[in-house]
Amino acid sequence: MSSSVEGRRPLLRVAGVSFSYLGRFAALDDVKLSIHEGESVALLGANGCGKSTLLKVLDGLVFPDAGTYRAFGEEITERSLEDDQLNRAFRGRVGFVFQNADAQVFSPTVREEVAFGPLNLGLDRGDAEERVHDVLELLDIAELADRAPYQLSGGQKKRVAIASVLVMNPEVILFDEPTAALDPRSTRWLVELLGELRRAGKTIVIATHDLERLPAMADRSVVIDEAHRVVRDGPTAEVLDDRELLEGANLADQA
C-alpha cells in the first residue's frame, strides 16, 4: 500500500469477506482490502478467481456470507440498504461500469439512459438535464443523445455506460474489465479517460486482465489467486516485476 495513504481512514473496507454462489461455488475466501480516497487500484486474477464478485460486493449487489463490508464508515448489508436514506447516499457515491455494456444500457434513447440515475435519485429534472448535457459533451457523444442504444457500436455503448455513471458524480468508480472487447481506438480513449478521472481525484477500482495497460490504469494492484484469496497487494510496478507471482496466479505463461 502506498505510504501516502497509510494511517488514513479508508473509503471502502472489506474484512475477512467470503462469498459462495448458491452456497457451494466459492468466489471469495477471507478477503481483506481497504481502498482510500484518490487511489487507483487494480484487481488482478484469472477468470473465475472472484475479482468481479469483489466489485459486486463493493457496489452492494451481493453480500458476504462471512466478514464485513464498510463504505464511508457505514456497514453495508442487505438489511442496512433497506434504509432509503443510506441507500440513496451509498448509490450516489459509488458507481459501477459493467464489463458488458448491454447489461447496463436499457433505456429507449441515450439521453434517457444517462438521465435515469439522477432522476431515480430524486434530482430536479432541469438539473438532471444539465448534468446529462455536460457529461455527453465530456465524453464526446452528444450527437448520440437521441439514438437508441441498439444502434450503437460496442465502443459507443461503453461510452454511454460510463456516462450513466459519471452523471452521478460518484466519489468511487468501479470498472469491470473496462478494455475487454474494445477496438484499439476505444481502448486508448478509455485509458486516457481513466487518467483524467485519476487526476480529478476520483477513487477508482478496476478488475482487469490487461497487464499491458495496467501501469496507465492503476498505481496499486491486488492479486487474487485461483483459491479466491488475496496473495499480493502492492505497487503496480512491483507486482508486474514479480514473474513468479503472475505465473502462480495464472496471469502469465510459465517461461
Image: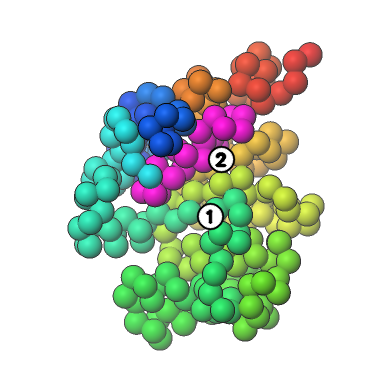
Q: Is residue 35 left or right of residue 238?
A: left
| Residue at image location 62% in from the left, 29% down from the top | 46
Quarter the N terminus occupies = top left
Instruction: Where is residue 168? Give x, y as percent.
Output: 43, 66
Tag 2 secondary structure: strand
* Magenta-highlighted residues: 38-61
Q: How is the image coloured?
A: rainbow
Amino acid type shown at disc 1: Val
Quarter the C terminus occupies = top right
- Which label number is shown at residue 207? 2
Q: Earlier in the sequence, mark 2 or mark 1?
A: 1
Amino acid type shown at disc 2: Ala
Q: Is residue 81 magenta?
A: no
| Residue at image location 70% in from the left, 71% down from the top | 152
Is residue 65 in sight in this rendering?
yes
Is residue 73 in sight in this rendering?
no
Instruction: State whether residue 99 is above or below residue 246.
Output: below
Q: Is residue 39 left or right of residue 159?
A: left
Q: Is residue 45 magenta?
A: yes
Nearer to the camera, 49 or 118: 49
User: Would you name the residue on which mark 1 appears?
Assistant: 97
Residue at the extreme bottom of the image, as rendered: 126
Image quadrant in which you'd find residue 206:
top right
Instruction: State whether residue 14 is above or below residue 133.
Output: above
Image quadrant in which you'd find residue 140:
bottom right
- Which label number is shown at residue 31? none
Q: CA distance from mark 2 to mark 1?
A: 11 Å
